[in-house]
Image (cartoon, helix red, strand yellow):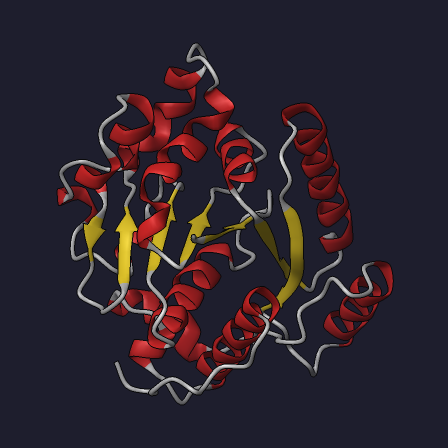
Amino acid sequence: MAHIISLCNQKGGVGKTTTAVNISAYLAAFGKRVLLVDLDPQGNASSAFVKDKNQLGKTVYDALVHGDDPFDVVKKTRFSNIDILPANSSLAGATIELVGKKNREFLLDELLKKVKKRYDYIIIDLPPSLGLFMINALAASDRVIVPIQCEYYALEGLAELLRTMGLVKKNLKVKNQIMGALLTMYDKTSPLNRAVSKEIHRNFPGYVFQAVIPRNIKLAEAPSFGMSVLHHSPYSHGAKAYRKLTEEIIEILEGHLVKKPALTA
C-alpha cells in the first residue's frame, strides 16, 4: 500500500513543486513505484515529466470534477517508475465547481483509493493556498512535508499551517502527521538564514529534516529543461541534497537505509 505524502505551505515560492518533482525522481531511482499528483493549476510539476501540459487530454480536473476513472487520467512519463496525475490551467476554476459536491473534502481520497495499490509512494504537489485542494490533500495523506524558506515570516506561516492542519484533523477525523519541516533555498553564508534555521529547530524539535536544500543554480535551471535535478545535473549540490532527503524519507517510513541510486537517468 502506498505512502501518501503532501507538500504543503500556503506561501508560494518556498520549493513545494521543486521538492515534489525531485523526491519523486529519487524515489523512482531507488526502485520505488511513484505517482506524482499535480494539484496546482500552474501545472509546473507536470511540466517536469510531460512534454506539453496543455496537450494532455484528460487531467486531474476530469477525475475530480467529472468523476472520470483515474486509470484513464494517470499518464506514464518518460522516466522509469514515475506516473503522473497531471494538471493544467483547466484546474483553476475547479474549487468553484466542487463547492456543491457531496463529501467534497474527500474527493481526492476516494480517487487515490482506486489507484494506490499500484504504487509505493504517492506525492501530492499543492498550490500556495489554504483552500479546498489543500483540505483534500490533507484528508488523503498519511504524512505532510512542509518546505520552508529561511526568511523572516517562516515561523508565522508554519504556525498558521499547523493550525489549519489541526482544524482539518479535528473536523474531518483524519490522521495525517507532520513528517517534517524542510529548509529550502538555504544560504549558509546568510546570518538571517542561519538565525531562522536555529529558531525553526528550537520551536519544532524533532520535526525538521536533517537534509537541507541549498540555493543552487542547477536546481533553479532544471525546470527550464523539463527535468528533475537528478536527470539534469546529478552531481550538483542540489541533487545531493534531494538524494539525502529521499534517503531520510525512506528510512523514516520503511525503517531501513537504502542503497545509493545510480546518478544517471
The residue positioned farthest toward the top in the image shown: 100
Please give the name of the residue rendered at 40% of the width and 18% of the height, measured from the top-left corner.
Answer: 98
Judged left or right of residue 185, residue 204 is right
Please give the name of the residue rendered at 17% of the width and 38% of the height, measured from the top-left corner.
Answer: 72
* 114 in relation to 253, above or below: above
Q: Is residue 198 visible?
A: yes
Q: Is residue 44 visible?
A: no
Judged left or right of residue 202, residue 221 is left
* 122 in relation to 65, above or below: below
* 156 in relation to 167, above or below: below
Quadrant of the rendered image containing residue 58? top left
Please give the name of the residue rendered at 34% of the width and 87% of the height, measured from the top-left corner.
Answer: 263
* 136 in relation to 86, above or below: above
Number of numbered labels in the structure image: 0
The location of residue 178, given as percent across then percent down, is 67, 52
The location of residue 120, given as percent across then percent down, is 40, 59
Please tell me which residue lies in front, 199 or 192.
Answer: 199
Quadrant of the rendered image containing residue 73? top left
The location of residue 46, given as percent across then percent down, is 29, 52
The location of residue 258, given as percent across then percent down, is 49, 82
Please tell me which residue lies in front, 146 or 92.
Answer: 146
Give the position of the C terminus as an image quadrant.
Answer: bottom left
Please give the name of the residue rendered at 28% of the width and 45% of the height, measured from the top-left corner.
Answer: 86
Judged left or right of residue 150, residue 12 is left
